[in-house]
Amino acid sequence: MKFIFRDRKLTYAIQKFIESQPENPDETEWALIQNANGFPLDESSQAKFIRKYTLNGMSESDIFKIRVDEFEKNGDLKGLMEASRRRGTNLSTLIKNYSLTMKPQ
């Protein structure tokens, strides 16, 4: 799956990040969040790091649940399907795990 970022500031930041990485022709992926020793944080450490900077310590999952709830309240099936596609999560799985109001039958 490929997404094109159109925001110039984000594109600029990504380009500068890539340029700042040590040159290694075999490496094409870099960790955005690293520990003091330069090693990537594991998933639970990443979640804790991100929660420090979000409103009320919300997780990425909490924020996604809010988005799903808005799609549901507005009857926006197209938005819900697009969120499912972009997240790489089956629509029924999304409703089962992220819906605050709908549950599959």
Image (cartoon, grey):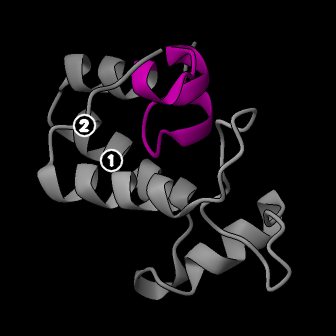
User: Residue 66's x, y, as percent?
Assistant: 37, 54
- First to last magenta residue range: 85-103
Q: Residue drawn at (75%, 32%), measured in percent from left and top?
A: 26
In this picture, is 14 found above or below 6?
below
Inspect the image, locate mark 2, and give the three-letter code of the amino acid beneath it: Phe
As for residue 87 lying within the magenta part, the answer is yes
Q: Residue drawn at (64%, 36%), measured in percent from left and top?
A: 28
Element type where label 1 sits in the image: helix
As for residue 60 lying within the magenta part, the answer is no
When asked about the image quadrant of residue 33, the answer is: bottom right
35 relative position to 25: left or right: right
Q: Residue drawn at (46%, 56%), measured in percent from left and top?
A: 19
Mark 2–mark 1 distance (CA, rounded to whole Å):
20 Å
Quadrant occupied by the C terminus? top right
Question: Quick one: label 2 or label 1, which is nearer the N terminus?
Answer: 2
Residue situated in front as seen by the camera: 83 or 96: 83
Identify the residue under disc 1. Answer: 67
In this picture, is 75 found above or below 19?
above
Inspect the image, locate mark 1, and give the three-letter code of the amino acid beneath it: Arg
Q: Residue drawn at (27%, 27%), measured in percent from left and top?
A: 4
Identify the residue under disc 2. Answer: 5
